[in-house]
Image (spheres, coloured by chain):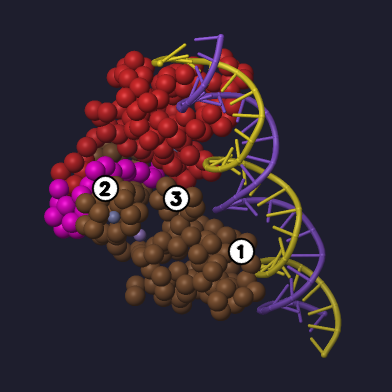
Chain colours: A red, B brown, C purple, D yellow
Amino acid sequence: MTVDLQKIKKKLANNNYKMTSQRKAILEKIIENQGSHLSAEEIYEQVKKDDSNIGLATIYRTLELLCDLGIIHKLNFDDKCRRYELDKEDEHHHHLICFECGEITEFNDDILEDFEEDIKEEHSFEVIDHRIKFYGYCQVCQ
Amino acid sequence: MTVDLQKIKKKLANNNYKMTSQRKAILEKIIENQGSHLSAEEIYEQVKKDDSNIGLATIYRTLELLCDLGIIHKLNFDDKCRRYELDKEDEHHHHLICFECGEITEFNDDILEDFEEDIKEEHSFEVIDHRIKFYGYCQVCQ
DNA sequence: TTGACAATGAGAATCTTTTTCGATACAATT
DNA sequence: AATTGTATCGAAAAAGATTCTCATTGTCAA
Ligand SMILES: [Mn+2]
Ligand SMILES: [Mn+2]
Ligand SMILES: [Zn+2]
Ligand SMILES: [Zn+2]
C-alpha cells in the first residue's frame, strides 16, 4: 500500500503531535478499510474491538486532526454523517454513487487536471483541488 | 428567469400535491435568492417576514418534497447544514469554493458531458448526473 | 522525581433535522 | 349548508451527529 504509518508519524511529529496508541489504532482501521469510506461511528466500532476503552470523542478529535494535516479527507455522500478516507497523495480518485442501492465505486482519473487552468483564466479562481461525484445506476441496479 | 411558479404548480398537481400558500412562499424566496444556496433556517427567516406563523417543520417538509420532485437540489458545502438551490433544467452549473473566505461562485459548463459515456463503458455505471466542486482561492483571497 | 503540557474518556451540551400528534384547510359529496 | 375524507400544517418532542467541558491520565524533558 502507498500509505505507511511511519511517514504519518513523522508528519504528526513535525506538527508537534504524538502518535498515541489511540491515533495509531484509528489510522490502522482506516488503512485496513481503504475504499470503505467509514464514518466516525463505524471507526469507533472497529477500534473498540481492540481497545474497548476508547471514547467516541477521541475518534472525532483524531479525525479532525488528521484532516487538518491532510492525512485523510472528509467526505459527504448525502448521508446523515460524514465519512472519511485516506489521502492517497499521488492518485486522484472520484466516486460513482448508485441512486438505487447507494453503492459507492471509486475510479481514478485526472479528467479535470487541464480544466483547472481554464478556470484560473476565466474566473480568476485559483483551483487547488476538486471533487466529482457521479450519480446514476450501478451495474446491478440498471 | 427560467423558472416559473405555474409550471411548478402543475408538477405538484401531477403528483397529487397542492400549491399551498406556504409552499408558494418558500418557492418564491428560493427563486428570489437564486445563486445564494440558502439553508432551511435561512429560508425560514425569509419566509417568516411575510408569514410569521409558518413552522420550521413545514420548511423542512417542503424542501424534502421539492427535492423529491426534482424542483430543487440539496447541496453540501462542508457546512454544518444542507443548502438548497433551484434546478435549472437546461443549464448545468458547478461551484468554486474559496478555502479562505468560503465564497461560492457558480459557473456553467458541461465539461463532463462526454466523459459520462466513457464511464458507462469502463465501469458499467450508467451516469445520470454529476456534481463538481472546485476548491481553491478566489480572486480576492489569492 | 517532578512539573508542564498534551491527550484522553465520560458525559453534557449543541445544533440540525425528523417525527409525532392534534388542529386546520379545503375540495368533493351528500 | 352540513358532512366527510384527506392533505397539510404548527408546535413541540425526539433523534442523531458532532462538539465542548472538565477532571484525569500519560509523556517526556529537565
Ligand atoms: Mn473514495
Ligand atoms: Mn449553485
Ligand atoms: Zn446499485
Ligand atoms: Zn475568498
On whether disc 2 and disc 1 are found on a single subunit, the reply is yes
Give residue B79's mark: 3
> Can residue B131 be found in the magenta stretch?
no
**Between discs 2 and 1, the one toward the N terminus:** 1
Please identify the quarter of the rendering in which residue B20 is found.
bottom right
Measuring 25% from the left and 54% from the top, which residue is drawn there?
B141
Of helix, strand and loop, which one carries label 2? strand
Given residues B45 and A115, the one toward you in this image is: B45
Which residue in the protein does label 2 denote?
B136
Q: Nearer the viewer, mark 3 or mark 1?
A: 3
> Can residue A136 be found in the magenta stretch?
yes
Give residue B56's mark: 1
Of helix, strand and loop, which one carries label 3? loop
On screen, B49 above or below C7?
below
The quarter of the image that holds ligand 2 is bottom left
Position of the C terminus of chain A, as image quadrant, is top left
Report in which chain the residue with disc 1 lies: B
Report in which chain the residue with disc 2 lies: B
On screen, A58 above or below A136?
above
The residues tagged by marks 2 and 3 sit, at their Cα atoms, a distance apart of 16 Å
Amino acid type, callout 1: Leu
**Segment colored magenta:** A117-142
Given residues B128 and B79, the one toward you in this image is: B79
Decide if residue B36 is in sight here: yes
Question: Callout 1: few (<14), some (14-19), or many (20+) C-alpha neighbours within 10 Å?
Answer: some
Measuring 30% from the left and 34% from the top, which residue is drawn there?
A93
On whether disc 3 and disc 1 are found on a single subunit, the reply is yes
Residue B29, percent across and down? 47, 72
